[in-house]
Amino acid sequence: MKTLYIIRHAKSSWDSNAKSDFDRPLNSRGQRDAPLMGSVLKQRGITPDLILASSAKRAKKTALIISEEIGYRENDIQFDEDLYLASWGEILEIIQDIDMHIDTLFVIAHNPGMTNFINHFCKDKISNLPTTGVFSMEFDIKDWKLLKSQVAQNVDFDYPKKH
């Protein structure tokens, strides 16, 4: 059994002096929501074997904040530039390359790829994975390479406005 947590980066600032979209920082809401959702994950006793995140500034900061909240070693986070604005299919390819010994995986990246990924694997569709939204799903597989068109089981959808 593999458990996947699809997490959208926290709210970012459009008003910053960032030179590019890739470099946009979190805004004040994002700085508040990322620790909140990290705390929710900690309260539920959820600890990943691996956190994989986009290397864009807002996703990287979200990963660092959540890792601190749940007690995951910052140095163990893997940042992947290919997750920046990746399509659902590109996200799938990245996940399929994860070592089979990783049972619980956090992927922190961007929309619309994240929402589309969720909707590909779940019977009940969502319209949007909001910023700092956490969508978990289980797959009855032994290796991430086998993740293709399975229907996700035991799904859960949480986000800051629920709290």
Image: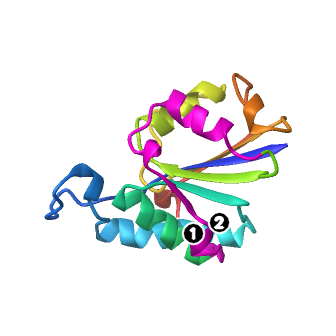
Q: Quadrant of the N terminus?
A: top right
Find residue 40 and report its horizontal and vertical position in percent: 62, 68
Magenta stretch encompasses residue 69 = no
Say what secondary structure mark 2 lies in: helix
In this rendering, position of residue 14 left or right of residue 49: left
Q: Quadrant of residue 123?
A: top right
Q: Amino acid at mark 1?
A: Gly
Badge 1: how crowded within 10 Å, few (<14), some, or many (20+)? many
Badge 2: how crowded within 10 Å, few (<14), some, or many (20+)? some
Q: Residue furthest top?
A: 149
Which label was assigned to residue 102?
none
Q: Which residue is mark 2?
A: 41
Residue at left 52%, top 58%?
162
Q: Amino acid at mark 2?
A: Leu
Say what secondary structure mark 1 lies in: helix
Colour approach in the figure: rainbow
Asked whether the residues under the numbered discs 2 and 1 touch, taking CB atoms below 8 Å apart as contact, a structural biologist would say yes
Residue at left 43%, top 48%?
81
Q: Is residue 126 visible?
A: no
Q: Considering only vertical position in the picture, is 34 above or below 138?
A: below
Magenta stretch encompasses residue 89 = yes
Tell me where the magenta segment starts and ends, as one range. 70-99
Find residue 148 and report its horizontal and vertical position in percent: 69, 24
Residue at left 40%, top 45%?
84
User: 84 or 1, which lies in front?
Assistant: 84
Which label was assigned to residue 38?
1
Residue at left 63%, top 40%?
95
User: 131 or 86, which lies in front?
Assistant: 86
Find residue 42 and report its horizontal and vertical position in percent: 67, 71
Number of numbered tags placed on the structure image: 2
Find residue 3 and report its horizontal and vertical position in percent: 75, 47
